Image (cartoon, rainbow, N blue to C red):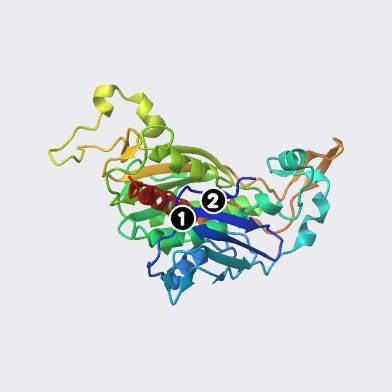
Amino acid sequence: MGNTLGKLFTLTTFGESHGPAIGGIIDGCPAGISIDLEAVQQELDRRKPGQSKITTQRKEADEVVFLSGIFEGVTTGTSIGFQIANTDQRSKDYSHNTDVYRPSHADFTYAKKYGIRDHRGGGRSSARETANWIVGGAIARQIIKDIKITAFTSSVGDISLQNGQDLKDFSQIENNLVRCPDPVIAEKMIALIESIKKSGDTIGGTITCVIKNVPVGLGEPVFNKLHAELGKAMLSLNAVKGFEYGSGFEGTKLKGSEHNDHFNPDGSTKTNLSGGVQGGISNGMDIYFRVAFKPVATLMQKQSTIDSLGNTVEMQGKGRHDPCVVPRAVPIVEALSAMVLADLFLQSKTK
């Protein structure tokens, strides 16, 4: 089972949604880096459940405990071990689907692959795992302090920011429940999510990420392209159905003469349809990409499905779930970006 992200800066994780704890080991972090432990916890607080009326009401403190690798606030160069306790599990909420496969979940595929599964919240395949990624990302950020990573909600359902609007003013992102930089659009998104939640349904959306101050030269020209590494990380995130960077799919509508980024004398480009990556390598311009999230698969509505014997049965979701995963996924997108960039940054120092 693939439990590790990265090559030099690596995060290996463990734990299940309803087990006693989750956690991980970070390897490859250089010695002598001062770690702001409060900043790590602040990132966890941005992701944790129960933070607003439009998220799951599971209450987890998500307080990280570091077990090794940090002494008096400074990294020692050894493995950084950490743990996050699970304190608000309600395993009984999943007793109804012990032998039932929830539609569009990992239940069926996991059981067929491994011959066993933890039905309590999805076990290892649960998005609870992503709290570990936040810790890894928060440490990674402190290796690449000059690089600024900002993600935000750019659409929910059919409500979205206008083209280009999502790359300008970031000051309002943390001032609303949905983490959208436009307060007016944010209120419309919140109203839609509340309406969807009342009906027992769910809704998807997109997150845009902008990365500034990236040095030239991160990434490789063949299989370790910068955008490919970012794409792999984002597509590892639960509920993600798509990744596009730079001009993305809209770029297919342009002619080459319209799409090329022409150089300025200093090596910067007049436009940035490349999204900060050319030939798989960062060119010093802002990196920007979008990540598409499907509607959460657990519905508070009756659905037809099958059980482990292949019988058709009817089921209805129970428990506490996000009606829209996008707002809480914003810090996770940032964390994954930070780990990818820290890994590539350290790789560049070995050349």
Quadrant assignment, res 281 = top left
Q: Nearer the viewer, residue 234 or 207?
A: 234
Quadrant assignment, res 113 = top right
Q: Label 2 sits on what residue type? A: Leu
Of circles 2 and 1, the one toward us is: 1
Relative vertical location of residue 70 with respect to residue 254 in this rendering, above or below? below
Residue 125: x and y, percent? 66, 49
Relative vertical location of residue 250 with respect to residue 167 in this rendering, above or below? above
Q: Which residue is mark 2?
A: 192
Q: CA distance from mark 2 to mark 1?
A: 27 Å
Q: Nearer the viewer, residue 185 or 79?
A: 79
Disc 1 crowd, CA 10 A, few/some/many (<14, 14-19, 20+): many
Mark seen at residue 335: 1
Task: Name the residue at 77% across, 59% down.
Answer: 93
Relative vertical location of residue 257 with respect to residue 239 in this rendering, above or below? above
Q: Residue furthest bottom?
A: 72
Mark seen at residue 268: none
Residue 16: x and y, percent? 68, 57
Q: Label 1 sits on what residue type? A: Ala
Q: Judge whether residue 54 can be spotted in this image.
A: no
Image quarter of the C terminus: top left
Q: Are marks 2 and 1 in contact (CB under 8 Å)?
A: no
